[in-house]
Image (cartoon, rainbow, N blue to C red):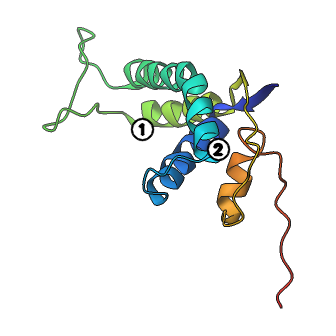
Amino acid sequence: MKVEKTIEEVLNFGNVANSYIGRTDGKETKFTYAIKKVAKRLKEHFDYYNDELFSIDVNTCSTDDKGNILKDERGNFTYTREGLTKKRNDLKELLKHKVSFENYIATEIPEDLTEVEMVSFLDFVSDKVYTEQEPV
């Protein structure tokens, strides 16, 4: 099913998915298959984010009077106060950008997912909504 998410949600899914795959020691399950399948579908959106992030850096960094980009001794862009504020605002807007992709709901959802994983995977690979458990 086609779903729409923000870039921020897509990046969050990617981070949580990598962490989850790491904690399963590479064990292939229907759930890890679904995660990998959706991650491949999201690649173009990860690439878009990285390209836009670079453009934001180039368009907001400091330049000399000839327009040459200024970098510090470690090769990082430098910014004026105004440039840094603009970068922050542009990044906030980028994270709100909506993208569409085909999700892939796994047929088996592990019972040991954390609250963060359940929320992050919703509509990407899971249709199971997190509900807080009552203490026993």
| Residue 132 pos. (x, y %) | 83, 71
In which quarter of the view is residue 129 placed? bottom right
Can you name the residue that lies furthest to the bottom here? 136
| Residue 7 pos. (x, y %) | 63, 32
Residue drawn at x 45%, y 19% as measured from the top left: 51
In which quarter of the view is residue 134 placed? bottom right
Label whose residue precedes the other's in the sequence (2 or 1): 2
Q: Is mark 1 on a helix, strand or loop?
A: helix
Q: Name the residue under label 1.
A: 81
Front residue of 133 and 106? 106
Along the horizontal axis of the image, is 123 left or right of 8? right
Q: How crowded is mark 1: few (under 14 residues within 10 Å), some or many (20 or more)?
A: few
Along the horizontal axis of the image, is 39 left or right of 47? right
Compared to 104, does 134 lie above or below? below
In the rendered structure, which amino acid carries the disc numbered 1?
Arg
Front residue of 111 and 115? 111
Residue drawn at x 49%, y 57% as measured from the top left: 24
Can you name the residue that lies furthest to the left here? 73
Which quadrant is home to the N terminus?
A: top right
Q: Mark 2 points at which residue?
A: 30
In the rendered structure, which amino acid carries the disc numbered 2?
Lys
Front residue of 106 and 49? 106
In which quarter of the view is residue 63 placed? top left
Which quadrant is home to the C terminus?
A: bottom right
Tag count: 2
